[in-house]
Amino acid sequence: MPKMKTHRGAAKRFRLTGRGKIRRGNAYSSHILEKKSPKRKRAFRQPSLVSAADTNVIKKKLGIG
């Protein structure tokens, strides 16, 4: 049986936390920024967690579990 390969696109976008949750960057943070409030733009800098519904799919792509 061949080895599982990591999905390289997923590997660049997601990271694991120490407790096994998956961190992701925020969408909507790269252009058309004039109409977005400064508070909203600051919030985009902080990484978010992936929802529970998507966690299993992403872990599989990362070769975890």
Image: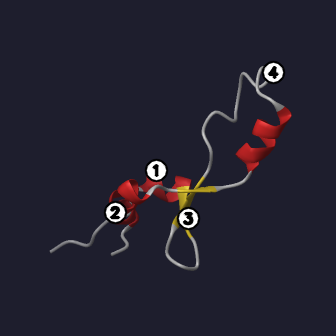
Q: Quadrant of the C terminus?
A: bottom left
Mark 4, residues whose alpha carbon is within 10 Å: few (<14), some, or many (≥20)?
Answer: few
- Where the N terminus falls, by quadrant? bottom left
Q: Looking at the image, is mark 2 or mark 1 nearer the viewer?
A: 2
Front of the two marks 3 and 1: 3
Instruction: For mark 4, give the secondary structure.
Output: loop
Identify the residue position indicated by label 3 in the image. Answer: 15
Q: Which residue is mark 2?
A: 56
Q: Give the residue at x 62% y 50%.
A: 25
Estimate the x, y position of residue 8 in percent, counting from the top left: 44, 55
User: Which comes sooner in the sequence, label 4 or label 1?
Assistant: 1
Foreground label between 4 and 1: 4
Cα distance in 3D space between marks 3 and 1: 12 Å
* C-alpha distance separating marks 2 and 1: 16 Å
**Lower position in the chain sequence, tag 2 or tag 4:** 4
- Distance from disc 4 to disc 3, alpha carbons, whole Å, reads 29 Å
Q: Secondary structure at mark 3?
A: strand
Give residue 7's position: percent from left, percent from top. 39, 57
Q: Which residue is at 50% across, 56% downward?
A: 50
On the image, numbered disc 1 is attached to which residue? 9
The type of residue carrying mark 1 is Gly
Q: Earlier in the sequence, mark 2 or mark 3?
A: 3
Q: Amino acid at mark 2?
A: Asn
Separation of disc 2 and disc 3 at Cα? 14 Å
